[in-house]
Each structure stands twice: as structure tokens, then as C-alpha cells.
Amino acid sequence: MKEFFTRQTANEGIKLPLTHPDGSPSEHWLQVRGVDSDSFRKAETKGKQRVMELIALKDEDLREEEIAKEEINCIAALIVDWSFPEPLTHESAVMFLTEAPQVRERVNTFAAKRSEFFAKKSSPSTSGSKKSSSSKTDQEGQKSHSKST
């Protein structure tokens, strides 16, 4: 059952190296939580509630602008740490993601890839079934290996 758990790793986050807008590598990174993280789930719920309120706005431009802000707020909740000298706050993350939409898109896409969070294993599982080395084929393989060395 534990092989399907993503919440803990999603809460811890994974480092995402940043590239410059031209695609060249940079020394900077973001530690990004996954979409299964508690903070993202909370921000997403709050954002959905806010969007429901915003739908009632008659000014279409204002409505679209405010909905876009809510999306950025949700994505900012995914950032748990970064390499920039400026301290990470929700406000600084929102500002960064607003001014660097290519990073916002990358963070959003990365955080949604659950496979990134499954791939992080701290140690092999000991609760799963293990292949027994007592089979005749394995024993023969071990014998031939020891003869050749």
C-alpha cells in the first residue's frame, strides 16, 4: 500500500533546477511541493472558493485578472524553498511567479507530475515481497559466477 503514498514527499518537495529564459542553465533552483501536498490542497480549496465569488463580477477584465491572481497564489503555495538571496515568503513567491511566467508554468507542470514524487526513495522497501535466491536457476547462476571469478 505504501508504494502509492505521495503526500509525504509532496510536502517535502523536490529541487527543480531553473534555467534562464533562453534555456541556458542557471545556478538557481526552487524546492517544489507536489500537488498532493497539504499546503497546495489548502490553497487550491481556498482558490476555488474565491473563483466562485469572482464569477459574479460583471467586469470581465477584472474577473479574468483576479482569477489569474488566484492561480498564481495556488502555484506559489508549491514553493517550499529557493536559492535566491531574498527570503522566501508567499508574497515574494507570488511576485517571482508573476514576473517569470515561464517559471510559473514549469513549476505548475512539475508539481503535477506525481511520478517525480514517486521516484524519490530514501531507502528500499522492506515490507514488499523479495525474490528468493533459493531457486535452482539462481543457485546455478551463482555457481557459474563464482567459477568465472
Image: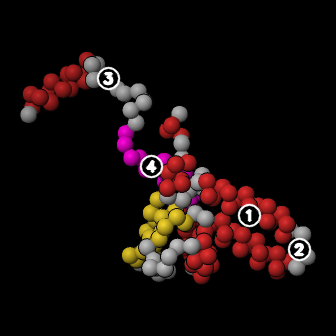
Quadrant location of residue 94?
A: bottom right
The answer, for residue 147, to whether it is visible in the render is yes
* Badge nearest the viewer, 2 or 3: 2
Q: Name the secondary structure under disc 1.
A: helix
Query: In the depicted view, which residue is nearer to us: 98 or 89?
Result: 89
Q: Give the range drawn in magenta.
A: 111-124
What residue is disc 1 on? 47
The answer, for residue 113, to whether it is visible in the render is no
Residue at image x 52%, y 48%?
Answer: 8
The alpha-carbon separation of the residues under discs 4 and 1 comes to: 29 Å
Crowd tier of the residue under label 4, counting other residues whose Cα lies within 10 Å: few below 14, some 14–19, many 20 or above: few
The alpha-carbon separation of the residues under discs 2 and 3 comes to: 65 Å
Does the residue at mark 1 contact the one at mark 2 (Cβ under 8 Å)? no
What residue is disc 2 on? 57
Three-letter code, disc 2:
Leu
The alpha-carbon separation of the residues under discs 1 and 2 comes to: 16 Å
* Badge nearest the viewer, 4 or 1: 1
* Badge nearest the viewer, 4 or 2: 2
The alpha-carbon separation of the residues under discs 3 and 1 comes to: 51 Å
Q: Name the secondary structure under disc 2.
A: loop
Q: Name the secondary structure under disc 4.
A: loop
- Sequence-wise, which precedes: disc 3 or disc 1? 1
Residue 122 inside the magenta-drawn segment? yes
Please provide percent x and percent y for residue 112.
58, 57
Three-letter code, disc 4:
Ala
* Mark count: 4
What residue is disc 4 on? 119
What residue is disc 3 on? 132
